[in-house]
Amino acid sequence: MKILGIDPGTTKCGWGFFEYDGKNYSQIDWGIFETGKEINIGDRLAVLSTELEKVIQKKHPNIVAIEEIFFMKNIKTAISVAQARGVVISICRINKLKVYEYKPNQIKLALTGYGHADKNQIQQMVKLILKLKKIPKPDDAADGLATAICLAHSEKF
C-alpha cells in the first residue's frame, strides 16, 4: 500500500510518503510545500493545490492520511490551516483517493504509545520506525511521515 501523509499548513505543508506491506517500509520520501508569508492566501492555496497534485501524480499513493486541526489560540492561524486542509482533501478526492483524518494525539499515541508526546519524541520514532539515518527535516515533513505511519499502524490498513 502506498501511503501519503500530510501535515497541513499554508506557509509550510509537510508531506511524507512510503510503501508499506504490513511489515516493511520502502520508497520513503518526504518534503514540504512552501509559500512565502507575503503571498496572499488565495495564491498560497493555489500553490498548495498545484504542488500536491504533482506529488500525487509522481508517487501514485493508494490512500492519504491528514492531520486534523487541534485547538489553536490564534483563530487566524486556525482558519488558514482549515483552508489548507480543505484544499488537500479536495485534491485527494478529485484524484479518487480515500482520505483518513487523525487528531494530533492519535498520531502521537500510534507512534510513541503516549498521546501527549513532544515533537522530539515523535521525530525520533519516525526515524526509528522508518530506519532512517537522520530525523527528516524540516519538522513539517517529519509530521507528514508521522501521520502516514499512524495510518499504516491503524486497523483501517
Image: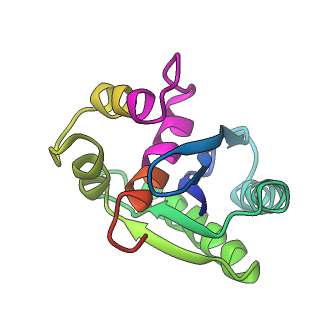
What segment is highlighted magenta in the picture? 126-146
Q: Is residue 108 left or right of residue 25?
A: left
- Evaluate whether residue 107 shows in this view: yes
- Image coordinates for residue 62, horizontal then vertical, percent: 65, 70
- Image coordinates for residue 50, horizontal then vertical, percent: 83, 59
- Image coordinates for residue 70, horizontal then vertical, percent: 31, 58
Q: Is residue 103 left or right of residue 58?
A: left
Q: State yes or no: residue 129 in magenta.
A: yes
Instruction: Classify the position of the C terminus by image quarter.
Output: bottom left
Residue 102: name its quadrant. Answer: bottom left
Residue at 17 percent of width and 45 percent of height:
113
Q: Is residue 110 left or right of residue 43?
A: left
> Does residue 58 lie above or below 101 as drawn?
above
Residue at 73 percent of width and 42 percent of height:
35
Residue 25: name its quadrant. Answer: top right
Q: State yes or no: residue 113 in magenta.
A: no
- Image coordinates for residue 40, horizontal then vertical, percent: 73, 53
Residue at 76 percent of width and 46 percent of height:
39
Instruction: Classify the position of the N terminus by image quarter.
Output: bottom right
Frontmost residue, 45 versus 121: 121
Q: Is residue 94 left or right of residue 8?
A: right
> Does residue 62 lie above or below 148 as drawn?
below
Residue 60: name its quadrant. Answer: bottom right
